[in-house]
């Protein structure tokens, strides 16, 4: 089916931006999602996700663009989970293009080169995000 495409994230309150992203990832090959654990999200963001790990897992399992899901057991250091998957490509939203994604994931370009992994920026869907959904819900009278 082509390349193995790894992407990671929280995937809380799945919305059209998530679907657009996963669909674009699937154009390159088999999509494996590394799903952040509730504990990591709480530690990283200072608050738990709206949906539990199992709820987010169940939703991702139903998306036709996703061929596999693994738990991001390494937390902030994603290298262990990435090496478990051994992807050809790591896909990330283009909103990371101006932020330090390498620092976020705790790897370097040399590490990617050593493992023959390419980093691919997927166009970000403007106007929709989990934060935006929460804002909309809070605005409902």
Image: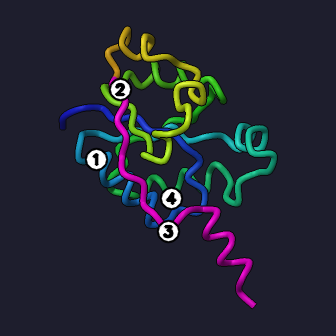
Residue 87 image label: 2
Q: Nearer the viewer, mark 2 or mark 3?
A: 3
Q: Residue at x 41, y 25 (%)?
A: 85
Calculate the distance from the C-alpha at mark 3 to the C-alpha at mark 4.
Answer: 22 Å
Circle 2: element type: loop
Residue 127 image label: 3
Q: Position of residue 74 (x, y in %)?
A: 63, 25
Q: What stretch of residues is rendered in magenta?
A: 118-141
Q: Nearer the viewer, residue 10 or 93?
A: 93
Asked if marks 3 and 4 touch (Cβ < 8 Å), the reply is: no
Q: Position of residue 106 (x, y in %)?
A: 58, 21
Up/down of 112 relative to 51, above or below: above
Circle 1: element type: helix
Queried whether the magenta region covers residue 135, the answer comes back as: yes
Q: Residue at x 50, y 41 (%)?
A: 96
Query: Which residue carries the number 1 mark?
Result: 26
Q: Nearer the viewer, mark 3 or mark 4?
A: 3
Q: Position of residue 87 (x, y in %)?
A: 35, 26
- Mark 1 and mark 3 lie on one chain; the one further toward the N terminus is 1
């Amino acid at each position: 089916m082509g390349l193995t495409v790894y992407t990671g994230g929280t995937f809380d309150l799945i919305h059209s931006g998530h679907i657009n992203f996963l669909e674009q990832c699937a154009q390159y090959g088999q999509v494996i999602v590394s799903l952040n654990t509730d504990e990591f999200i709480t530690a990283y963001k200072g608050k738990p996700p709206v949906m539990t790990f199992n709820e987010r897992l169940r939703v991702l399992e139903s998306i036709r663009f996703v061929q596999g899901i693994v738990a991001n057991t390494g937390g902030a250091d994603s290298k262990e989970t990435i090496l478990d998957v051994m992807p050809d490509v790591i896909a990330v939203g283009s909103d990371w293009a101006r932020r330090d994604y390498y620092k976020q994931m705790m790897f370097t370009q040399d590490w990617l080169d050593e493992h023959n992994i390419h980093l691919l920026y997927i166009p970000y869907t403007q106007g929709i995000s989990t934060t935006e959904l929460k804002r909309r819900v809070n605005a409902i009278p």
